[in-house]
Structure formats: structure tokens, C-alpha cells
Image (cartoon, rainbow, N blue to C red):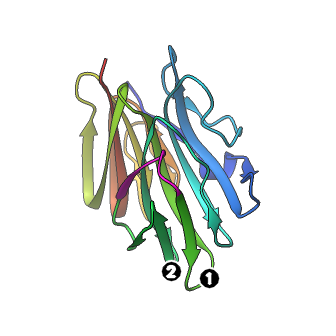
Amino acid sequence: MTARILRHADRVPTPWLNGGGLTREVARSQAGDACAPGDGSGRPGPGLNWRVSVADVDRPGPFSSLPGVDRVIVLVDGSGLVLSVDGREQVLERLVPFAFSGDAVTTCGLRAGPSRDLNVMTARGRVSATVEILAVAGRRDMSADDGEELLVVAATDGLVASEPPAAALARLDALAGPGVAVEGEGTVFVVRLRALR
């Protein structure tokens, strides 16, 4: 089955409720639904299974409280994003995933101007997520295991979706499907979303 391409250029930017940045939703799954492209709502919503988005952070401030949601965040651009999670400071390093609870009181600070990050949110007890950073040199084939959904996001330019018809991937374009193949020289985020029940 050919992977679907979800273009970053097609994503609708939605302002944060606190005005501190913009979110562009990559894809989501609500209870009873399979993976669907982002709908631009900007909020996880009731019945969330999982949600993957890209956020532009323009100013320091609080994160929304998301009870019952587990989160993974990866700094994509910028060098000064600092989270305070229940009072514990965490400096985010570029392309290094950081997991935390949506229940936690979380604020972010900016040390060196605006930043951009990839966010993965999952319903605790229903879905778990892993985010892996993979280098691509040549061709890389990836497939979902049983009970998983697979989303591969281009972290860099220089990549092509291999399956016919081949298509160039812009930075932050995503591929969704049970099997994904990319080629070229670059880096991807591999997001695996596993149903727990």
C-alpha cells in the first residue's frame, strides 16, 4: 500500500490559546478513526487517540494542561527552548526527543529567539508513541508492526518518497502508511503509534 504524503505547505496554522505561537497539525486519530490529515483545529479534542503537530514558539509562556495525555516533543529549529515541567527545568537539544506528561504544569522559555518543535500527543492507556531520529543515506524502508500506525516526517530537505510515483519531500512533509520508503541524503523523524487496547 502506497504511503500518503501530507504536505507541510497544506497545513493550516492555528494560534495557541495563549497567543504564544502557532500550531500546524500533521495528522491525528480520534477514537474509532484511522490516521487522518490534520484538520487545523489546533486542539487535541475529546476522544483523542493521538495527534502529531509542528509548533512555532514565538514567546515564553505556559503550555495548555492536557490531563490523561502523554507527550513527546522534539526541537526542530532554534537553540534556546527550555521547559519547566512541574518545576524541573529541561533544556531541549535539537533533534533529541523529550517525553513528559500533559498533566504536568509546564511552561516554556526562549533563550535565543523563536523555535519550532514536533509534538506527539497520545491518550494514556490507549496509545503509546516512540519518536526516533534516523539518518537516510540512499534508500530507507520502514514498516509498521502489527497494531502500529507509522508516520515519517522529513526533518531535512534532500529526501524523496520512493514508492511510485516518486515525489520530492519538502522539509516537514510527512508520509503515513503501513510501509514507507524514502531515499536521498537527510534525516527523518519516525513516529510509531501503538494501540494498547
Q: Residue at x 45, y 61 (%)?
A: 85
What kind of residue is marked 2? Gly
Residue 19 x/y as whole percent: 76, 60
The answer to whether residue 159 is seen in the rendering is yes
| Contact? badges 1 and 2 (CB < 8 Å) | yes
Q: Which residue is mark 2?
A: 80
What mark, if any, has residue 113 been given in the picture? 1
Q: Residue at x 45, y 60 (%)?
A: 86
Marked residue nearer the N-terminal end (1 or 2): 2
Q: Residue at x 55, y 84 (%)?
A: 111
Which image quarter is the C terminus in? top left
Residue 24 x/y as whole percent: 64, 50
Asked whether residue 25 is drawn in magenta, I would say no
Considering the numbered disc 2 on the image, is that residue within a helix, a strand or a loop? loop
Residue 7 x/y as whole percent: 59, 47
The answer to whether residue 157 is seen in the rendering is no
Residue segment shown in magenta: 98-105
Residue 189 x/y as whole percent: 37, 54
